[in-house]
Image: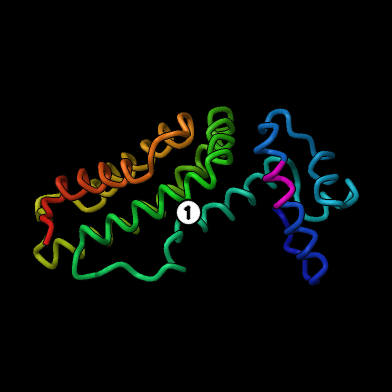
Amino acid sequence: MTVRPLTARGERTRAALIVAARTVFERDGFADARLTDITVEAGCATGSFYTYFDSKEDILDAVLAAAQEEILHPGMPHGEPDSDDPIATIEAANRAYFQAYRRNAKLMMVREQVAGISPDFRQKRVERGQVFIERNARGIRELQEAGLADADLDPLQAARALSGMVSRMAYQSLGVGGADDIEDLVFTATLLWANALGLTRK
């Protein structure tokens, strides 16, 4: 387990290593990335790496954790969507997610690469995805309680299906493909969400 550094200098060094690791992973892929490349990119001694991280897998986990925070809360700096219009809220959330995914697309491809070969990373991917699912399930439950969404739906199962749909759209269109128009994705994903939940535009 990585021990968090206690000094301001240590925090800066650790942060520099995370930024450098992301650069190297996105450029070279996980398999070809070397720890020496990361420390050179960060401008620190190779031995310093092990003060903060146990392995290449450990620092990748830190890189992904930082990206997860951006993707999970991408719209916060731009203000809250109109809570009186649930479809507008879903649309805003979808737009923020797709935009954040595009910014992080190369890193998401590295995540897919490692999750395919590492059971530990596969489990961590499931756990991180569960954060999205549970947040969306709460939103669906609130819509049902307000009489706006289909009451027959199980909120968790609906959230799992709809979150998985949006995640896969992002992977195929912005990760593997990389050229799809964001607004086309937003329109389609939002319409499918609304139809699935039985929502109507005000």
Along the line of sight, the residue nearer the viewer: 51 or 167: 167
Along the line of sight, the residue nearer the viewer: 171 or 79: 79
* Callout 1: SS: helix
Q: Is residue 179 above or below residue 187?
A: above
Q: Residue at x 41, y 47 (%)?
A: 98
Q: Residue at x 35, y 70 (%)?
A: 80
Q: Residue tagged by mark 1?
A: 71
Residue 20 located within the stretch drawn in magenta: yes
Q: Is residue 193 left or right of residue 48?
A: left
Q: Residue at x 26, y 69 (%)?
A: 82
State which region is magenta. 19-23
Residue 103 x %, y % = 53, 47
Along the line of sight, the residue nearer the viewer: 31 or 100: 100
Q: Is residue 100 left or right of residue 28?
A: left
Residue 125 located within the stretch drawn in magenta: no
Majority secondary structure in the magenta region: helix
